Image (spheres, helix red, strand yellow):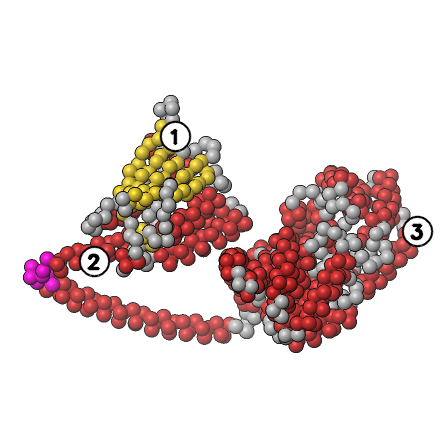
Amino acid sequence: MKKQLLIIATLTAFTLKAQCQDKNLNYKYSLILDSLKAKLPALKDSARVDCLNAISETFVYLYNSYNSPGFKTRGDSMSKYSAIAYKEASGLGYKYGMGISLLDLALASRIGDNKDSTSIYNNRKAMAIGKEIQNEKLLGLTYLDRPEGDNMENYKQALYYFQRAGDQKMELETLTNIVWDYTNGEQSVEGIDYAERAIQVAQKIVPSTPWEDEMVQWSYKNMADLYKTAGDYQTALDYVRKSDIYGKATDGMKEDISFSELYYLMGKYDSAAYYWDFWNKDYATYHFGHQAFGNTLRGNIYLKKGDYDKAIAMFNLSLNAFRKDGKYNTKNTYGLARPMLAMGEAYAAKNDNKTALSYATQGLGYAMANNINQSKINGFELISRIYYKLGKSDSAYLYLRKYITLKDSVQNNQFIWRLNNYKKAAADANKEARIGFLNKDNKIKEQQLKQEATFKKFLIAVFISVILAGLYVFRNLTLKRKNEKLESEKKQAELYRQAAELEMQALRAQMNPHFIFNCLSSINRFILKNESKTASNYLTRFSRLIRMVLINSQKPLITLEDELQMLRLYLDMERLRFKESFDFSITFLNAMDDDNIFIPPLLLQPFCENAIWHGLMHKDGQGRLDITLSLGNNILYCTITDNGIGREKAEEIKSKSAEKEKSMGLKITTERLALLNREKGVHTSYQMEDLLDENGNPSGTKVHLRISYKESVEAII
């Protein structure tokens, strides 16, 4: 009935999670199976049904490895005992026993096919029985092992029922499955919450089977994996030590390979090799998945120490292990990415760039097919480096851009993840050492009070200084005004130009908080709707856009290319926010060098925002926003056309709603254009046109912008 265990054994055996299945564990479960079979003849009624179901479930753990002699026939063994249990439970009218045997039959039929129709049918029958007898544990088990629907939603529903039933052991198993689904090679803010809950539950239970011991150990191991993925290797090492201590105490899995990997990631290659040797004695010949992962790790250690030939030999062992895997699972290419890319690194280090490129390209292909972000990052960087060595600068630059883009995205996610985890870790540490930190806390508070008193005195001194400086400035201004009549006309014109420039800077400064406010409101809406993935995607785009806004905020003029790049980011964000209810396009009607055309920043965005919020947002059906640009007579012409509801209908909606504020962005932009037109020879303006269909009904709005632009950097200065 342990679906996640089955999936790990058959699909992801090459990961670290598989190392818990060893010969010692098979021996333990063989003893349990013998004990259950010995008790069976003396049992009657419901106790006999429960024993038959327990025998069926023991086969899941007993033969959960390719090397186990009964691996291929365990489904038949499970079906045999589950069918007997169901028949006897039906004769007794023992509903709970019927439900459990149906779940075991569902798992047995699904060993060969994860979406088997028989499995789905039996699971649904078990769920119906659980609802009929209102047994929360049985309902929890049906959701935990449900072969249809979303895994995460099923696990959370199972967790709800196990908590209500007070079954902490099944609660721990469900939490472990949830954490495995959340991590899956990526860090997750929600994953850390469930991992912490798993540790709390693990500390409360008293394990009675090897599987329960493993679940307790996995509560520490999963937390270590989360921190490892986020790049906090020291914290990950602390949790691996806890897992290793528990494993040794319960004769469970050893963590030598985890120690080796973490020390490798920390750059401590001698320590990594030391623990790898211990792992090699215990696990290297047990399973091809272990061989592949371990040999790739050892090869990387050789690679870092400059022993390229030994590294290549180890990588070849890894690839041979996966070729052996092809006998069992020809579609499983997940584990091939790392050894392929590592082989490419080794040949690149030996300056055999053509061979390196071949391996790197294959490795990147496997990483892309399985969406392994870290391997994709490594692959882009490696191929870029190889192309550069081969003198193919264009290809090198292309892959370098892909590398930087993906790395920035992953690092942004890691930053958010670490920020949340560090806050949680600080809170936990504070609870554990509350008494010991009371005195330190009091000292800190006293120091803070002293600092606050000093700061207040400083503020008073600054306030007095400001007043004196203000009086001094006021006196100077008064004298300056008396002497203004004596100033020349040229000087007056210069002062007027400086004032206009300051006004323009002030209006640009208003645009940034206005725009940021709208973006933060959108992010808040996604969070309130629990759309965490959408909020994360939106936040990634938002961070890139804010970076550009901050860079350009101090410039009076920016290139048209930068302006359009910010505009595309903004439109992508709005399109994501409104669930892709509109499309947009940016078109050049004639040839232009947008990298040498300088215009004021954030000039086009308010008009697009106005079209989306007041025109397209209220439109039934798919909206359309088209931006066209052309040059003529030293003027940049921009047309922004939407197929929204039109200005008249928008005003009606606005008058009926509670939000009657004017468009702040459009208002500020109008003032900016007015200031631009004060400069000599600058004529920038816009006009709005209502569009009508053939029946005279409103069919959208068109904005015509005329922008005088600059063609040189000197013009900006």
The three-letter amino acid code for the residue at tag 1 is Ser
The residue that appears at 49% across and 74% down in the rendered structure is 440
Q: Secondary structure at mark 1?
A: strand
Residue range in magenta is 480-489
Percent position (x, y) of residue 192?
59, 59
- Marks 2/3 in contact by CB < 8 Å: the verdict is no
- Counting from the top left corner in percent of width and height, residue 138 is at 74, 46
349 w.r.t. 168: above or below: below
Tag 3 or tag 1, which sits nearer the N-term?
Answer: 3
Q: Main secondary structure of the magenta part?
A: helix
Residue type indicated by callout 3: Pro
Instruction: State left or right for residue 456 relative to residue 138.
Output: left
The amino acid type, in three-letter code, at marker 2 is Gln
Q: Quadrant of residue 346?
A: bottom right
Marks 1 and 3, how far apart at CA: 82 Å
Let me know if residue 657 is in the magenta part: no
> Which residue is disc 1 drawn over?
699
- Outermost residue, front direction? 391
Q: Which residue is mark 2?
A: 498
Image location (x, y in percent) of residue 242: 67, 69
- Identify which residue is drawn at 12% across, 58% down: 490
Which is in the foreground here, disc 2 or disc 3?
2
Density class for disc 1 (Cα within 10 Å; few <14, some 14-19, many ≥20) is some
Instruction: Give the CA distance from mark 2 to mark 3.
Output: 100 Å
Q: Residues within 10 Å of mark 3 (few under 14, many from 20)?
A: few
Q: Is residue 163 left or right of residue 50?
A: left
Q: Which residue was labeled with disc 3?
A: 41
